[in-house]
Image: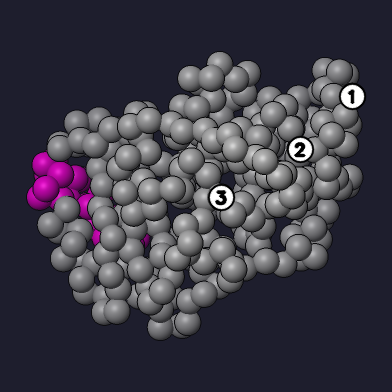
Amino acid sequence: MKIYKKIKSIQSYLRKVASDGIKIGFVPTMGYLHEGHLSLVDRSLKNCDHTVVSVYVNPMQFAPNEDLARYPRDLKRDLKLLRERGVDTVFLPNNSEMYPDGFDTYVSVGSITKIGEGVSRPTHFNGVTTIVLKLLNTVRTDILYLGQKDIQQALVIKKMVKDLNMPVKVEICPTVRERDGLALSSRNVYLSNELRNNALSLISALKTGEKAIRYGIIRCAAIERRMRSKFGEFKGMKLDYILFADVKTFKPVKSITGRTVIAIAGFAGRTRLIDNIIVNPGVR
């Protein structure tokens, strides 16, 4: 497994790799890897000739009051997991490499970033799109692998790639969950046993919404009332939002008439968690 810390070095190496007609897959991460990240790695290893993983905690996507300083990190463990998995190349830049003195260029995607996470974290998506574009310009991948758990983020990146005519295929892979349904997240390490149990409020509310749709309820307002009631059964939780959006455009919808994302965000103590499912009223 080759490890690079400098942009020019990994660019030079991957140009040689790509010149041999090799298909490159790329998984960008902020480290503290779990089976969700590794499922993306596995997908790339299966479908591509060469797999690149980046580990970089991007400060630009954190607001001043968020958890940048305490975001979990364990690079030694991450590298061990990636080496065991069979990853070909790892990119480990630092802040000065990604944002050198004088850096003053940012990427902004439009309306899709103004709802959901964009309301709760108004600076977040500019930080995400800027770093992902920089990483894609560095790795020059054929396929970019992203997780459904961050579906709005994934669709924002997919729109950026499309709008900027980038020759990259974006593949969004299923959320990986614990046996009880909790979506895997690096931030789960913050949760005490009590908070972890309370965090099941997100998937419980989502399942309640899915069940309502199976029973023929399609108005989002009616579905949301049932979801909020279920969420409220878990004490110590604070709901941020519930959002219903078209699965391709992420535009909000008022009724479930086709494949739709139901997204939810909430707080377990100080820890903010997100989750989502995709529903289709035409499929039983």
Which amino acid lies under the numbered mark 1 shown in the image of this protein? Answer: Lys
Which amino acid lies under the numbered mark 3 shown in the image of this protein? Answer: Met
Which amino acid lies under the numbered mark 2 shown in the image of this protein? Answer: Thr
In the rendered view, would you say 240 is above or below 233? above
Q: Name the chief secondary structure element in magenta.
A: helix
Disc 3 versus disc 1: distance between alpha carbons?
Answer: 31 Å
Numbered badge on residue 196:
none
Pick whichever of labels 3 and 2 is earlier in the sequence: 2
Q: Which stretch did the figure color magenta?
A: 202-223
x%, y% of residue 140?
72, 27
Helix, strand or loop at disc 1?
A: helix
Residue at image point 43% right, 31% down: 109
Numbered badge on residue 16:
1
Position of 94 with respect to 124 (left or right) is right
Disc 3 versus disc 2: distance between alpha carbons?
Answer: 25 Å
x%, y% of residue 238?
28, 70
Give the foreground label among 1 and 2.
1
x%, y% of residue 15?
85, 24
Q: Which residue is mark 3?
A: 60
Helix, strand or loop at disc 3?
A: helix
Label 3 close to label 2 by CB (< 8 Å): no
Q: Is residue 205 magenta?
A: yes
Quadrant, the C terminus: top left
Binning the other alpha carbons within 10 Å of mark 2 as few (below 14), some (14 to 19) or many (20 upward) gives many
Residue 49 falls in image quadrant: top right
Position of 53 with respect to 106 (left or right) is right
Residue 35 falls in image quadrant: bottom right
Residue at image point 30% right, 42% down: 115
Numbered badge on residue 51:
2
